[in-house]
Image (cartoon, rainbow, N blue to C red):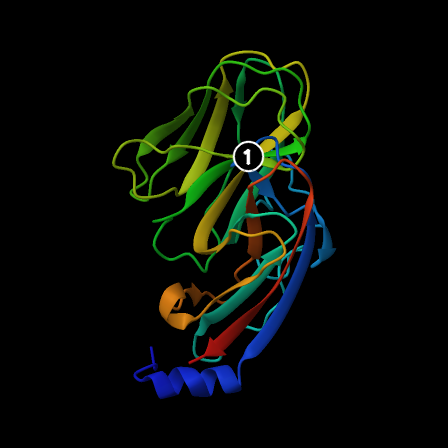
Amino acid sequence: MTISTVDDIAAGLAAGQVRWFLKNSTACKAIGSYQSTWLAVGFPGTGATSPAYTAGAGYTCDKSTTGAIAYSNGAVKNWLAKWFATSTIAGTLILVDRLWSCSGMGYAAQTWTVTTPGALPARITDYGVGCQIWVEQFVAAGTASGTLTINYKNPADGAEAGVIPAVVSAPLIGQMQPVPLATGATGVRSIVSAVNSATWTSGSWGLTLVKPLAAISLPIAGIGNTLGWATLGLPDLLNDACLALIWQGGATTANQIMGRMEIIDK
């Protein structure tokens, strides 16, 4: 790291990258629930469809993946130094590095085994420390009940399981559900399988691994918020990161999210 003074940050901002985004997020299931903007229209455009869990290759995502927020890799290292966002409804916007994603898991009460899940992207050198698992709803579902268990490998390559004790009934397209990891877990290295304990009446979903980078609170609809480097803590934007957004809605209506990121290379 070559940032040693505030002057270094100021100089970086003066010569840094500015990246705008605008996404038309679909409606949330409930207040406080999470919604993926990956398939939402706007800029960047609709994200690439995740491969089926049986694909056996191509699960990983990077900055070239359709739907990622565009930016240039750092000559030294990229840092997020300033972030502005606004939304037509109140809520919280989460910036993540989208690492890995699969789709095609269905509604039957069965085990969905991922075919050759492979390693995380090469940019992740700590074997998944800090990575999270999210259920991502690719097709809206009917009535659902029971538990959902995700079997995964931890950063030390040990077997663990994360359990959603009560899945959301009739989840909407784009809805995301965080998977609680095992007690004491430090992250996720790879996904092994998913197990439905009960049958959903319809729908299709998948699993997505992300590494959270930053979050910004937007408590008043239509009134933006700006976070500077001191509040953000200068998150490290790894080269080739697949930057994406997750929305936590304060209302159950569709909304439009707009903002800009200022990235410094130091």
- Graded by Cα atoms within 10 Å as few (under 14), some (14 to 19) or many (20 or more), the crowding at tag 1 reads few
Q: Is residue 99 above or below residue 15?
A: above
Q: Is residue 182 at all visible to an observer of this figure? A: yes
Q: Is residue 150 shown left or right of residue 255?
A: left
What residue is at 51 percent from the left and 22 percent from the top?
Answer: 167
- Indicate the quadrant containing the N terminus: top left, top right, bottom left or bottom right: bottom left
- x and y, in percent, of residue 140 in the image: 69, 27
Helix, strand or loop for disc 1: loop
- Indicate the quadrant containing the C terminus: top left, top right, bottom left or bottom right: bottom left
Q: Is residue 23 above or below residue 252?
A: below
Q: Is residue 229 shown left or right of residue 18?
A: left
Q: Is residue 234 above or below residue 194?
A: below
- Residue 5 sits in quarter: bottom left
222, 244: nearer the viewer: 222
- Residue 76 sits in quarter: bottom left
- Residue 158 sits in quarter: top left
- x and y, in percent, of residue 132 in the image: 42, 42
Residue assigned mark 1: 31
- x and y, in percent, of residue 37 in the image: 63, 47
What residue is at 64 percent from the left and 61 percent from the top?
Answer: 64
Query: How many numbered discs, if any?
Result: 1
Q: Is residue 61 at all visible to an observer of this figure? A: no
What residue is at 63 percent from the left and 56 percent from the top?
Answer: 222
220, 139: nearer the viewer: 220
Q: Type of residue at label 1?
A: Ile
